[in-house]
Amino acid sequence: MTHFSAFSLLKNALTGHKNWTEQWPDAQPKAEYDVIIVGAGGHGLGAAYYLATQHGITNIAVIDKGWLGGGNTGRNTTIIRSNYLYDESARLFDHSVDLWQNLSQELNYNVMYSNRGVLMLAHNVHDVQSFKRHVHSNRLNGVDNRWLSTEECKEYCPPLNISKSSRYPVMGGALQERAGTARHDAVAWGYARGAAARGVDVIQNCAVQAIRRNDDGSVAGVDTDKGFIKAKKVAVSASGHNSMVMATAGVRLPLESMPLQALVSEPVKPVFPCVVMSNAVHAYCSQSDKGELVIGSGTDQYVSYGQRGGLPLIEHTVSAISEVFPIFNRMRMLRKWAGITDNTPDRSPIIGKTPVPNLYVNCGWGTGGFKATPGSAHVFAWTIAKDEPHPINAPFTLDRFRTGRLIDEAAAAAVAH
Amino acid sequence: MLLIHCPYCNETLPELEYAYAGEAHIARPANPSEVSDEEWAEFLFMRSNVKGIHYERWRHLHGCGRFFNAVRDTVSDKFLTTYEAGAPRPDLDTLVNTPAEGGK
Ligand SMILES: Cc1cc2nc3c(=O)[nH]c(=O)nc-3n(C[C@H](O)[C@H](O)[C@H](O)COP(=O)(O)OP(=O)(O)OC[C@H]3O[C@@H](n4cnc5c(N)ncnc54)[C@H](O)[C@@H]3O)c2cc1C
Ligand SMILES: [Zn+2]
């Protein structure tokens, strides 16, 4: 594995970029592993990386039915923030934002984390009250978030229309300055490269068909397109397909899978300095380094695994963007796509043990799990290695749906990204 | 845009007229006070989330306002049939083997 540095860049530039070595081998499955992780998204690859670097477990396979990072990790609008209302969520997401700060250095791979700030607009009295409540609750939890007046919003994000006569007037906003965006693919690639360098096998184009169990109920391994692979522990991190994979082990989950869409515009010069979210109008947008506006849409209302999404949502999104940012209303959209998101009833994830011994699950990230990738992977690795949750993910059990101790960010946020 | 057939209005109309209402044939426990926490969790939260043929509820929100059931393939999003609430699950074999009428 080549170490990336200014020097290696220069050297390879001088030799016409012909001598870069492969970043990770195309591994084929061995007969047996200590840990098999199902799903090579950011969460699965990251868990393998932290198992290898922090828990000394390297006999690991990360198995994906497609190519690594081809799921929601490579399809999202890359908004990173941690200004969640409840204590449990604030701890989990802020742990992640902490890890984002130095992730490029840690992985020796540029994930292009950009703390350009996330500004959430308030358009009515209810928004103002609810965002201020978030600001106060975040501050009590040590999470950065502050209230901006209408004029301060305009100063922070000049393209905003703050006219009082607009249909959705800006009455202020909550700003998290530590929040921002990152390069989604690079997160998967960086973790894959780091894990592979420590001996982890990343096996692509190999669907896990079923989880096999021993007579005593514990996990035996997985049946795949490439045959049975034995494993001491199996950890499932398959986003939209978690219900399907876990059902093969007899575990039912409180999930509904729905397509979530995003779209990008034609590229233009830098006009948009931060991320802006407008929950009430349901418009959110940022500008990529390539110059495209990156715009997130909503989920279809029904369960679907058709990775397309319905056109009514795109129409709604584009009209919302035009309302909030009239300057963009003549921009052409280049392409749109969808990913299948797994949504829990309280819109908080489930990270932990399952009723099946040695089977772990990291699911329910729904429409908002990219931001959590490093933090989630870190605590999931801990849970797998020690067979007990890290204090940060301890509240995010599957059992909370039995005890009723929900972490109801759904009620707190109205949308979750 | 999905086209959905309301079995009450007997019309096939755009998705925007309808609201999705979750998995179908999940009966509320008859004696709530006798139900265990596990059974409540199952009733309230656990869903089959099928990739394939799915039984689900819809409501004709901007029409007759009534709830009905549907059988839909969650990969192609194609409706196999819709039927009135309270009616038993239609037989899958006959549904899959009879070509659906346009839009139904
Ligand atoms: C359009 C869109 C916009 C979004 N915007 C944001 C945002 O702005 N901010 C944010 O924080 N989050 C956002 N999200 C959510 C975020 O993308 C996800 O929560 C997160 O990326 C999930 O990562 P993951 O590693 O768990 O899953 P994925 O990256 O989806 O990885 C799961 C992997 O499992 C594999 N898999 C599935 N079934 C099997 C099987 N049977 N065998 C083997 N492999 C299997 C899949 O191929 C896939 O590669 C968005 C999502 C979408 C779709
Ligand atoms: Zn009707």
Image (tube, helix red, strand yellow):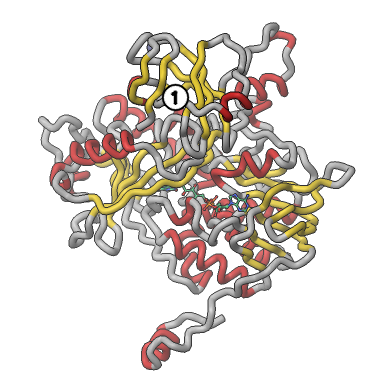
Q: Position of residue A121 (x, y in %)?
A: 27, 38
On the image, which quarter does residue B31 sit in? Answer: top right
Respond yes or no on whether mark 1 lies under 8 Å from ligand 2.
no
Q: Position of residue A64 (x, y in %)?
A: 60, 57
Q: Position of residue A85 (x, y in %)?
A: 46, 36
Check the image and name the residue furthest to the right: A215
Residue occupying image coordinates x 34% and y 45%:
A296
On the image, which quarter does residue A41 sit in? Answer: bottom right
Q: Nearer the viewer, residue B86 or A219?
A: B86
Check the image and name the residue furthest to the top: B31
Element class at badge 1 = loop
Q: Is residue B44 above or below residue A346?
A: above
On the image, which quarter does residue A259 sit in? Answer: top left
Residue occupying image coordinates x 49% and y 19%:
B82
- Would residue A221 be found to the left or right of residue B16 on screen? right
Residue position marked by numbered label 1 in the rendering: B101
Is residue A136 visible to us here? no
The chain containing the residue under callout 1 comes to B
Q: Nearer the viewer, residue A152 or A69?
A: A69
Q: Position of residue A407 (x, y in %)?
A: 55, 32
Residue occupying image coordinates x 77% and y 61%:
A34
Residue occupying image coordinates x 64% and y 52%:
A380
Q: Is residue A22 above or below residue B65?
A: below
Rendered-image quadrant of the N terminus of chain A: bottom right
